[in-house]
Amino acid sequence: MTALLEVDGLTKSFGRGRKRHQVLHDVSFSVPAGRVVGIVGQSGSGKTTAVRCVLGLDQPDAGAVRYDGFDVLAAGRAQRRRFQTEVQTVSQDPYTSLDPRMRVEKIVGEPLWIGGLRDRAALRARALEALALVGLPDDAGSRFPRAFSGGQRQRIAIARALITRPRLLVCDEAVSALDVSVQAEILNLIRTMQRQLSLSVLFVAHDLAVVKYLCEHVVVMSEGRVVEAGSREAIYDAPATEYTRRLLAAVPRTDPAAERARRHARLSAGAGR
Ligand SMILES: Nc1ncnc2c1ncn2[C@@H]1O[C@H](COP(=O)(O)OP(=O)(O)OP(=O)(O)O)[C@@H](O)[C@H]1O
């Protein structure tokens, strides 16, 4: 299967002289078109740095990032523009990632504005269309972020990411700041969007349960290295490394599907009273 995103041998250090420390060691992985790939690892394992290198926010010391066959790090203007349109991100904190002074409609339409669209009616129409896609009501666009819950804000962030009709969605700890029940809602939304829009998704999280729920292929990182990569079944049912086994053993049981079933059972039990 052809990969939409190919990351090959990324190496990255921060600091100089004696303070220099290497954060990524020869990190490689790929995201096939239309697939969901998870990167999992403890805090500090280098996940965010790897993502920042992919997005061009950090410059790796060595290695390559190829998107749809072209070298992102050496891309010309047109290819960079294409990359910026086709690759969108959803980050962790729905409380700080949305500008509190902007109406939601403007927040959601901003990537199109940045891309050069200036027709206000078209911007508005596209923003409302994206908000509807993620299940937010018509009047959401005219309100400010403070009017929304954490889960709704993450829906707004997803609408913003989807407005350019991307091919690759990069989610960095996109549900970590949410309550477990809301996590399940947002994971389901990402999954629905992924299927409906045939998106490729790179989903980065420290929570193995969340990654298991969403990702077909999993890359395990530790101390800046990929220690293991494989199908969800291989990683979770027959981990090949001691690190993954320990990581799995340490996971608090917050499987979103199980949590949803538990809540549903509680609600049904209460309904007859
Ligand atoms: N700009 C920077 N300058 C110096 N060190 C950095 C910088 N960014 C990251 N690091 C270091 O790189 C290492 C990996 O951090 P990174 O944020 O990539 O890990 P992570 O797996 O995403 O962890 P978390 O989930 O906590 O964000 C850490 O030791 C971190 O302190």
Image: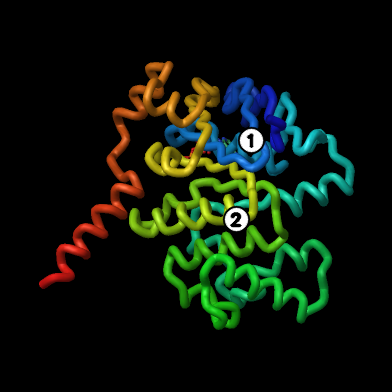
Residue at screen point 70% across, 53% down = 166
Question: Foreground mark, 2 or 1?
Answer: 2
Look at label 2 and name its amino acid: Gln
Residue 196: image tag = 2
The outermost residue toward the left is 273
Left or right of 53, for residue 183: left
Left or right of 98, for residue 234: left
Residue at screen point 77% across, 76% down = 122
* Residue 49 vs residue 210, the one in the foreground: 210
The quadrant where residue 1 appears:
top right
Q: Position of residue 57 (x, y in %)?
A: 69, 43
* Residue 37 vs residue 102, the one in the foreground: 37
Residues packed near mark 1 inside 10 Å, few (<14), some (14 to 19) or many (20 plus): many
Secondary structure under the numbered disc 1 in the rendered image? strand
Q: Position of residue 145 (x, y in %)?
A: 52, 73
Secondary structure under the numbered disc 2 in the rendered image? helix
Residues under labels 2 and 1: Cα distance? 18 Å
Left or right of 72, for residue 101: left
Q: Position of residue 109 (x, y in %)?
A: 69, 69
Give the mark, 2 or 1, whose residue is nearer the N terminus. Answer: 1
Residues packed near mark 2 inside 10 Å, few (<14), some (14 to 19) or many (20 plus): few
Residue 158: image tag = none
